Amino acid sequence: RAIKTNQDLLPETPWTHIFYNDFWGTLLTHSGSHKSYRPLCTLSFRLNHAIGGLNPWSYHLVNVLLHAAVTGVFTSFSKILLGDGYWTFMAGLMFASHPIHTEAVAGIVGRADVGASLFFLLSLLCYIKHCSTRGSSARTWGWFLGTGLCAGCSMLWKEQGVTVLAVSAVYDVFVFHRLKIKQILPTIYKRKNLSLFLSISLLTFWGTSLLGARLYWMGNKPPSFSNSDNPAADSDSLLARTLTFFYLPTKNLWLLLCPDTLSFDWSMDAVPLLKTICDWRNLHTVAFYVGLLLLAYYGLKSPGVERECNGKFVTNGKQNANGHSCHSDVEYRNSEIKPSFASKVENGIKNNVSQRTQLPSTENIVVLSLSLLIIPFVPATNLFFYVGFVIAERVLYIPSMGFCLLVTVGARALYVKVQKRFLKSLIFYATATLIVFYGLKTAIRNGDWQNEEMLYRSGIKVNPAKAWGNLGNVLKSQSKISEAESAYRNALYYRSNMADMLYNLGLLLQENSRFAEALHYYKLAIGSRPTLASAYLNTGIILMNQGKTEEARRTFLKCSEIPDENLKDPHAHKSSVTSCLYNLGKLYHEQGHYEDALSVYKEAIQKMPRQFAPQSLYNMMGEAYMRLSKLPEAEHWYMESLRSKTDHIPAHLTYGKLLALTGRKSEAEKFFLKAIELDPTKGNCYMHYGQFLLEEARLIEAAEMAKKAAELDSTEFDVVFSAAHMLRQASLNEAAEKYYDLAARLRPNYPAALMNLGAILHLNGRLQKAEANYLRALQLKPDDVITQSNLRKLWNIMEKQGLKTSKT
């Protein structure tokens, strides 16, 4: 929906609308908006649309190129932390090939995460430059400005991009200045490093400003989601909410570590709620947070008597035999805090002394890796506000950077610590094997994203209700009707109250003329979601076609009164409401209530959304004015219909009739011929042109058009009946009899068809058959004066010829 039905991508929509609407094209301040404000991502989609329309190739190309760019920038960032050796290359490869990225890269709307990641890294790199030039160059504030601008751009790609400012602060405090937790407050209190304090203050100010502007722009209201999007948030049990929310980060980490089971959708019951303390998954939660605390303690602990410095061991902060130095806790307390890095350690096969550069210690990298893993994920934890998903793999795109760094620096620390060459090789090749396995899983998972059917089948194990429902839509589009019906019923087996699935099953049944069943499922859909306007629309259409006009009228009216507040897709809702009003107007029109029809059509025009195709509505407005003999108004709306869709065939036909009525015969004929040219297979076009020819006394041509119309639309009663009538007026009675007979068989209980068949049989001398049809017509409509008169005339003829009649 962010692409295929988003009006903000269309050239006729002012591009500035992108900055007022959410990711799906809904006004941000609307009560039903998701509040997902990603204008730069939407702008990139609009550029794609301008270049290649809805051809997916260019969209996927941009996603892959963006992922390649992010991988390149991430590798450059890793080089700052790990140096020039193969561990940096390992980190880049792991990020490039991680399976968790498949959704963000292969799924086009995942571009929001990839684009946000690119500017996230650029912002972080700018801040690193700011730190390294602070106090020594005026350009340092240029780098800081770059940090702020890139952070803003990252947030305008996706909301979590703003968290880069917090990660930058972590880098400055714990990596660049290598402060420990207990040293932060004394540093602030004693004002030992004002430049650090100023930078952190500016980061805080800019982050607060961005978040404040973001909140203001979306109307100062959080989004609302259905309970199926995030069942834990909707749970009445505080215990279930707490245990589940604490468990979900554990599940997300497991997807990063072992992405064996992936799914396009983790909503509904994909992750069952943890309702009791006894749930064994709580053990995973405990293990996760204990491990996290241990890693944080390792990275933030104060220096001891003997500790590792970038893979080498030092004692009391003194220089070791390899010439590397680290400061002890005593030295920190007795000296001014200054930026310092440990020198480069064995990052490759050899430690080349001549190429040494200053690198952060392993503890520093662990802290930064944890911040990259945790901070960008915080918005998805339900900690500050509820989110519209349980798990979303694409949300892990930025946190996976921290994961890849953490695994790489851990492998490197082990590699440096062990002495035996065999163990070094084992660690190195184990890491390389992990990357290979990740790459293979990505290739396999990418196959699932080749088409919708494969994608939804792959998700049945994780989220059967959503996967079966979406699979039903795909199978239906492939005309596999029975398989689609089974898929819908499977979805409802797992979750019986899904309004969308109930509606989709009803639509499938309606399209296959199983109207009673369709009405049943539409009723269930409305019961599950009383605001589902499309279900009211189709219910009304079925009732109208069944002749239950009063029930249809009430249904259409109820639909038209449903507000669009708190609806996920207000545009689609407005389209359904407009269609309901259009059909209600048609109902009034068929009943001869033209003023009522006009009133409803005008209401439909007022409620009509931008994406609604109005040509049929405008044409029916013209028809109503035509019936009321208001020809100038009728002509105006016919022209409006043709302006909105130049190849709209019904408007060509109705406008042609108006032109003929007002004496513009040559113009009228052009419109009839144009309608035939637009669709030579449509019998209705020939029928209208035939009627025009008949009125012009061009009887032979009219008869030819009548025959052509009836041949093309031999199952359409109106076309066949009108063709027979034209042939009769052209005195081609034998041909007229053929089509009157066909019309009577199409509607065997329609009195007018039987009466006209009787009349043509009467003229053609088939008196007994004529009598039978007259009598049948009178059974259906006993008070029809014309049929009674014709029957009396027929009996007189039969009596003169000595034929037996039914009255005798």
Image (spheres, grey):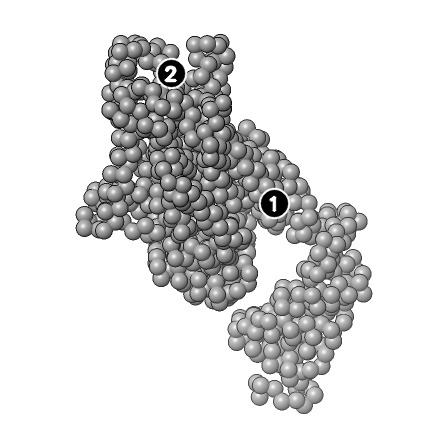
Near-viewer residue (684 or 7)? 7
**Depicted 199 relative to depicted 712: above or below:** above
Do labels 1 and 2 touch, CB within 8 Å? Answer: no
Residue 201 in sight: yes
Count all numbered tags in the image, as a single digit.
2
Sequence-first tag of 1 and 2: 1
Q: Which residue corresponds to the image point at 34% horizontal and 23% vertical from the top-left? A: 320
Near-viewer residue (620 or 328)? 328
**Depicted 135 relative to depicted 401: above or below:** above
Q: Based on the displayed image, in which of its 4 quarters is residue 45 positioned?
A: top right
Identify the residue under disc 2: 339
Q: Which residue corresponds to the image point at 44% horizontal and 62% vertical from the top-left? A: 487
Q: Which residue corresponds to the image point at 58% horizontal and 31% vertical from the top-left? A: 14
Percent x, y of residue 703: 76, 66
Residue 74 in sight: no
Identify the residue under disc 1: 57
**Label 2 secondary element:** loop
Near-viewer residue (313 or 269)? 313
Percent x, y of residue 545: 51, 61
Amino acid on which disc 2 is placed: Pro
Percent x, y of residue 136: 46, 9
The Cα–Cα distance between marks 1 and 2, rounded to whole angstroms, is 48 Å
Say whether residue 579 is left or right of residue 403.
Answer: right
Q: Based on the displayed image, in which of its 4 quarters is residue 178 positioned?
A: top left
Amino acid on which disc 1 is placed: Trp
Q: Which residue corresponds to the image point at 54% horizontal and 37% vertical from the top-left? A: 68
Q: Residue furthest left?
A: 277
Q: Based on the displayed image, in which of its 4 quarters is residue 725 positioned?
A: bottom right
